[in-house]
């Protein structure tokens, strides 16, 4: 029997609890419990979470975890790991966790253990990656392939883009890695402009192998290659595919022997650790990729087994629900203090917003509560000089996750000053301190600021943050970090009783676009849209 979220005992209790909580101030919470920072933290899979700078007491946490239990988060977690078809609108299992299960593990889907299949593909990917990296896989003219271009979009792009940037430090030198995603021809043209076709390998990555953007880019990439190499046979050496759709891959002209498969129980936005990660494996090598998978698995195990009170994805998920559903926070910022994680917020946007941007329950009823927040962010310290002003002194409540590493991969000592990494990390600690504790009017006046100016200098504080610290950005840590957010999204989706694994919301635009495409090129078909769309199309036609 589905539980109605707003009728649970914990929801009701939280509604009355929040009346008091709205009056709390982090300054008082810390004053009343000076050891709070040593208490309200948890650790797992190499990640340390400090959640003490949240507007919560022990009672809040108890109630939030009650809510998780009452809404069946644990049962649903068990169902996911067991391969039950929890993606009910597509009648599919949700088993990205099987992609990182160790060799020898068993995960059953429709009576079949899928782990050997997963490792068979991983082994083929590894053999291929080694042959390209080692120069034994050669292009049509006999030259080694030095440029890798992944063509894909959404989940077939964002994961490899984010992770290859994150793990650049571990990448093979001399390989150029590019990603083409946008159907805007500029993307392909600019990404291939300086590449030699004879040395370029295209990976066409698409779960369905029907996505308009990817298919258009793949066809144009093939034309670019053939224009230079002049022989259809070149496609076999310069194109490989990653897909679940072998038929469409073959129709496109890619030899199925050069296709790396995955399965319908892998959602696009959960597919980085499937063959969709091939471009990443080419960059960091099979060993680096396996380390990444090991990190994912570490977090899977933590999520599956740690008590809710110390379970990182559960804590992050439930704290998010606290602000989203009880403080009406509209967004959530993710602020990595590591240049290598530049694309992490963009990656999380698809992971979180495509998963939990839903307005009906699993049973198809309209929800009467808020679901997924807007996810956004940018690496620190750059964000500090752009949008932090609004977080500190604006009128909106924006809970933030700060992510930092104790060791840098690029130690730069500064003559006569602190090393770069200390400067960077000092900002993590300073920002979360400032957001929590702010600066009172009394403090401002005590500094001798004019009474007139003083209000402008006041920081209310009481802005909630989580801080995630890891020792070092390694493939393994990255895997754990990604899995942490995957499972956080899962926890929230389970509480909201929505399907975090479909994405019907992107369909309507796709269908309408394919209807409009022929209207743009043709001379005079009747336009039967609304007057605004008709007028826009007419203007475009006249001026294109
Ligand atoms: O944006 C919708 C979507 O279906 C995503 O979920 C998916 O990651 C992306 O399109 C790309 O799909 P495909 O891998 O099938 O090309």
Image (spheres, grey):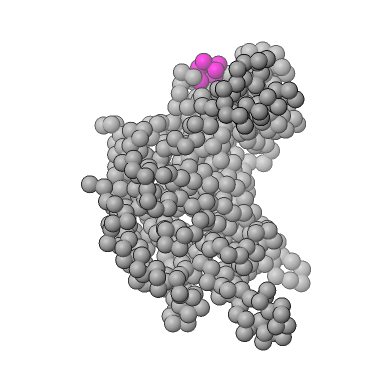
Q: Determine the residue positioned at 28% across, 57% down.
A: 7
Q: Residue at x 62, y 16 (%)?
A: 525
Residue 388 seen in the figure: yes
Where's the C terminus, which quadrant? top right
**Image check: 235 left or right of 3?**
right
Q: Find residue 109 and report its horizontal and vertical position in percent.
A: 30, 34
Is 381 above or below relative to 134?
Answer: below
- Residue at the image position 48 percent from the left and 40 percent from the top: 269
At which x and y percent is residue 517? Answer: 60, 22
Percent from the top left, x then y, of residue 453?
Answer: 71, 78
Instruction: Examine the image and state in which quarter residue 319 appears.
Output: bottom left
Instruction: Note whether 385 is above or below 189 in the view shown.
Output: below
Q: Is residue 107 visible?
A: no
Magenta range is: 249-255
Residue drawn at the location 35% of the way across and 35% of the way down: 89
Measured from the top left, where is residue 214 in percent x and y? 58, 28
């Amino acid at each position: 029997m589905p539980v109605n979220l707003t009728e649970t005992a914990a929801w009701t209790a939280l509604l009355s609890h929040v009346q008091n909580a709205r009056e709390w101030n982090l300054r008082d919470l810390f004053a009343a419990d000076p050891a709070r920072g040593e208490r309200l933290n948890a650790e797992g899979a190499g990640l340390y979470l400090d959640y003490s700078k949240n507007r919560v007491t022990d009672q809040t946490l108890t109630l939030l975890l009650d809510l998780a239990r009452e809404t069946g988060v644990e049962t649903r977690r068990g169902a996911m790991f067991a391969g039950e078809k929890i993606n009910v609108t597509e009648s599919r299992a949700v088993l990205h966790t099987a992609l990182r299960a160790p060799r020898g593990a068993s995960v059953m889907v429709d009576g079949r253990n899928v782990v050997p299949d997963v490792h068979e593909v991983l082994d083929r990917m590894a053999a291929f990656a080694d042959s390209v990296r080692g120069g034994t896989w050669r292009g049509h003219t006999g030259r080694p392939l030095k440029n890798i271009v992944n063509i894909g979009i959404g989940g077939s792009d964002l994961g490899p883009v984010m992770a290859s940037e994150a793990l650049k430090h571990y990448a093979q030198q001399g390989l150029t890695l590019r990603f083409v995603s946008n159907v805007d021809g500029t993307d392909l043209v600019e990404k291939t402009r300086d590449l030699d076709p004879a040395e370029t390998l295209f990976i066409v990555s698409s779960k369905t192998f029907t996505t308009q953007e990817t298919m258009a880019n793949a066809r144009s990439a093939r034309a670019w290659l053939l224009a230079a190499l002049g022989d259809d046979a070149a496609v076999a050496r310069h194109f490989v595919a990653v897909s679940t759709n072998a038929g469409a891959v073959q129709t496109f002209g890619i030899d199925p022997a050069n296709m790396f498969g995955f399965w319908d129980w892998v959602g696009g936005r959960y597919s980085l650790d499937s063959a969709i990660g091939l471009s990443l494996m080419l960059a960091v090598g099979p060993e680096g990729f396996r380390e990444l998978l090991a990190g994912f698995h570490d977090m899977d195990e933590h999520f599956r087994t740690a008590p809710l009170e110390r379970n990182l994805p559960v804590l992050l998920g439930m704290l998010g629900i606290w602000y989203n559903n009880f403080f009406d926070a509209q967004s959530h910022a993710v602020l990595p203090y590591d240049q290598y994680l530049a694309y992490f917020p963009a990656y999380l946007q698809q992971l979180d917003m495509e998963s939990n941007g839903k307005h009906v329950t699993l049973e198809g009823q309209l929800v009467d509560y808020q679901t997924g927040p807007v996810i956004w962010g940018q690496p620190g310290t750059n964000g500090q000089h752009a949008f932090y002003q609004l977080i500190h002194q604006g009128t909106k409540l924006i809970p933030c996750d700060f992510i930092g590493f104790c060791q840098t991969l690029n130690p730069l000592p500064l003559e006569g000053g602190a090393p770069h990494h200390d400067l960077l990390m000092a900002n993590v600690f300073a920002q979360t301190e400032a957001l929590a504790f702010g600066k009172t009017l009394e403090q401002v006046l005590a500094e001798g600021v004019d009474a007139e100016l003083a209000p402008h200098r006041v920081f209310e504080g009481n802005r909630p943050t989580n801080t995630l610290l890891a020792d070092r950005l390694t493939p393994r840590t990255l895997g754990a970090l990604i899995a942490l957010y995957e499972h956080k999204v899962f926890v929230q989706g389970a509480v909201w009783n929505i399907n975090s694994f479909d994405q019907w919301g992107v369909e309507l635009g796709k269908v309408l676009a394919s209807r409009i495409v022929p209207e743009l090129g043709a001379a005079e078909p009747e336009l039967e849209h609304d007057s605004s769309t008709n007028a826009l199309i007419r203007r475009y036609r006249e001026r294109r």
